[in-house]
Amino acid sequence: MLLDNGTWHSYRLPKASHCYDGAHGWNTEWPRIRDIGETSLLMTMHGMFWRFPKTFSAANSTGIAPRSSYIRVIGDFTRWQDKIVLGCDDTATNEFFNTRLVKGKIAGPGQSQSNLWFLPPSRLDQFGPPIGRGAIWINDPIKANTASEPFLFSGFDQRTLHLAHNSSEELTFTFEIDKAGNNVWTRLRDIKVPANGYAHTAFTPTEKAAWVRIKSDKAASKATAFLQFANTDQRQPAPPRPKRTPAAGGLIWARGEKRGTLLLATSQELYELDATLALKPLNEPKLRDWMQANLAPPKGVIEIDAASVIYIDEANKRWRLPKGDPVFNTLDVPVRIAREVSTERDLLNLHGTFYELPSNNAGGIAMVRPISTHNLSIYDFCSWRGLTVLSGLPQTALPAGEFITSKDGKQRLWLGASDDLWQFGKPLGQGGPWSNTSVQANVPSDPYLLTGYDQKVLTLSHAAPTTLKIQIEIDLTGFGLWVTYETFNIAAGKPTIHRFPAGFNAYWLRATALADATATAQLTYS
């Protein structure tokens, strides 16, 4: 909201990350706007760097634009000489609400640790591609011919709007735009949504404005207008990378006792990394044994079947995510799946892809987002002195960070920032809710992750001798607001291939067969 000449003006902007929605998230990173010596101000908000115009006012509100997405918790920032300096909240001994089954009963770091992050200004545009999700209404009552609050309409290449309502009549929604940010509104176009129905629309590059607002020709007790924005993901897929056996890695832990060091424990040896980045053998067998007992990754918390990877949450609900390289089907030694890398958010490593995983009080797995598909078999990872540390990697070329090798040459650690991981490869994957799965009529599948990927292709098939109807639903908000995207008639023996429109995004997808069948619903993300 903006206070201008004594009057409050409300503007809505999309979120990149939902990690800030929890009980502590609101005070972990307030939206912050500061002058860093550029033509526009820098704003941090909900996991995104933004350009914010110095002349912003209610009469001149154009110019807000995303720069890049980030993972770290940024409490404050400033310009210092030729660098941007960010104060980050990296590692806390107390995980508060951020416990979950896939982490097991892992010991927290020995002491809380944070650090300053020094960046050249150009790096602010080089982290994750901007992505924005947000609502004008979510199951809200609306009045006829009453305009909504303005929602940001500029700065993104791809803009999709989802509309749904519960009225028994068809509703016509009118979009109005403020082109110049001067509170002068003109009609853009209309979209009709059938009774109790859903529709989506993509805005074209020629439909330009600072802000958009919506109104309906009729009232409704529940209406949803949810926007999904993204910029084109220009990253390249990760190259094929050398594979290792999991036994090559070791457990890592930020040590306490005011030492500020990092420990690496294998089944036979212990190493200590100090502030000079010297990794040396350490003869403390009891400490090594303690690490093996208190930091071991949990077993059996992730399932993999023919269709996809299965994440089971604390309520025993199943969530499905894409598979990567088939080598990840055969790792027979437990490796780290999830661990806190910034206060109250986890890094999730599944089948060769890193994800940002909010704490459960901020949505948890329902609000997960992919960071990169790296194709690396990683044994363990953690935060240390403002760095992200990975163990078990082969000596291979990586686009960021650096390797530290032990004095005896036996062990190696990768050190970088969590936001270096965006560069490890564009998110890709293959999977879906079904793969030759016996399904019951009118029983929805598990949800399958849809958000954060670029090109999406859905393949539907079945083994029945006659045509089968399969209904595809999408979750607009991540919190279970399901709508019917389309019902497909799948002919016997002939798969149906559906390519989602460019820029189309929703959080989750599920499939429902309208008769008993053995069916397949698989998605390819490229």
Image (cartoon, grey):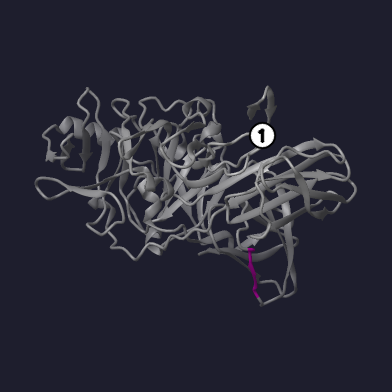
Q: Say whether residue 499 is magenta.
A: yes
Side of 341 relative to 402 (left or right): right
Residue in front for this viewpoint, 503 or 149? 149
The answer to whether one can see residue 436 in this image is no
Residue topped by disc 1: 58
Side of 464 relative to 412 (left or right): right
Q: Count the marks: how many?
A: 1
Write down the quadrant of residue 294 in the picture.
top left
Q: Amino acid at mark 1?
A: Ala
Q: Position of residue 52 (x, y in %)?
A: 53, 39
Q: Say whether residue 181 is magenta.
A: no
Which element type, helix, strand or loop, lies under badge 1?
loop
Residue in front for this viewpoint, 139 or 46? 46
Q: Position of residue 33 (x, y in %)?
A: 49, 32
Write down the quadrant of residue 481 in the picture.
top right
Residue at x 63%, y 42% (from the top left corner): 134
Residue in front for this viewpoint, 7 or 412? 7
Q: Position of residue 236 (x, y in %)?
A: 42, 63
Residue at x 35%, y 48% (from the top left corner): 420
Q: Quadrant of the N terminus?
A: top right
The answer to whether one can see residue 434 in this image is yes
What stretch of residues is rendered in magenta?
Answer: 495-501
Side of 289 relative to 467 (left or right): left
Q: Position of residue 180 (x, y in %)?
A: 67, 46
Side of 232 relative to 62 (left or right): left
Q: Is residue 138 above or below residue 239?
A: above
Residue at x 65%, y 66% (from the top left corner): 518
> Residue extending furthest left?
408
Residue at x 75%, y 61% (from the top left corner): 514
Residue in front for this viewpoint, 30 or 20? 30
